[in-house]
Amino acid sequence: MGAAVDAGGAVRTVGTMLAITENAAEAIKTLSTDAELPDEGGLRITAPDPQEGLELALAPSADQQDTVLRGEGIAVFLEPGAAQMLDDKVLDVQPVETDAGEQELRFAIVAQSDAAEPEQA
């Protein structure tokens, strides 16, 4: 079991939680620095409509109900619906070819047990 601290400072115990690869952590750190986020800022993942997928955005702080994951100098805020969807997943960054034939990096969500087929986030 792992522990997560919500934005109000309460520690919640969770069975599993989102894992973050080193590449994803580095991308989050770079994005946060480039956006000049405050120290308490980070990447917020929400699931406004679970049928439509997840939304990722930089945020200056966590919302009160968010699960906050911290480590490696980054913070990831999971809205409750997103936290439930991601509790057994891995956040990664993978190269994707654009329509113009160029490579760009995109966040991808993969299962912790099988990282073979990522879903683009």
Image: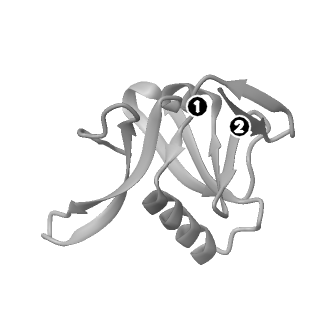
Mark 1 crowdedness (10 Å alpha carbons): few <14, some 14-19, many ≥20: many
Instruction: Left or right? Give the position of 28 relative to 6.
Output: left
Q: Which residue is located at x 48 percent, y 44 percent?
A: 55
Image quadrant where residue 29 sits: bottom right
Label 1 – label 2 distance at C-alpha: 8 Å
Image quadrant where residue 83 sits: top right
Q: Which residue is located at x 81 percent, y 32 percent?
A: 11
Q: Residue furthest right?
A: 9
Q: Are marks 1 and 2 in contact (CB under 8 Å)?
A: yes
What residue would you read off at disc 2? 66
Mark 2 crowdedness (10 Å alpha carbons): few <14, some 14-19, many ≥20: many
Residue 43 place in picture, x, y as percent: 59, 54
Residue 30 place in picture, x, y as percent: 54, 72
When the figure is inspected, residue 34 is found, relative to residue 26, above or below; the finding is below
In primary-sequence order, the first of circles 1 and 2 is 2
Residue 50 place in picture, x, y as percent: 45, 27
Can you say which quadrant of the picture contains the N terminus? top right
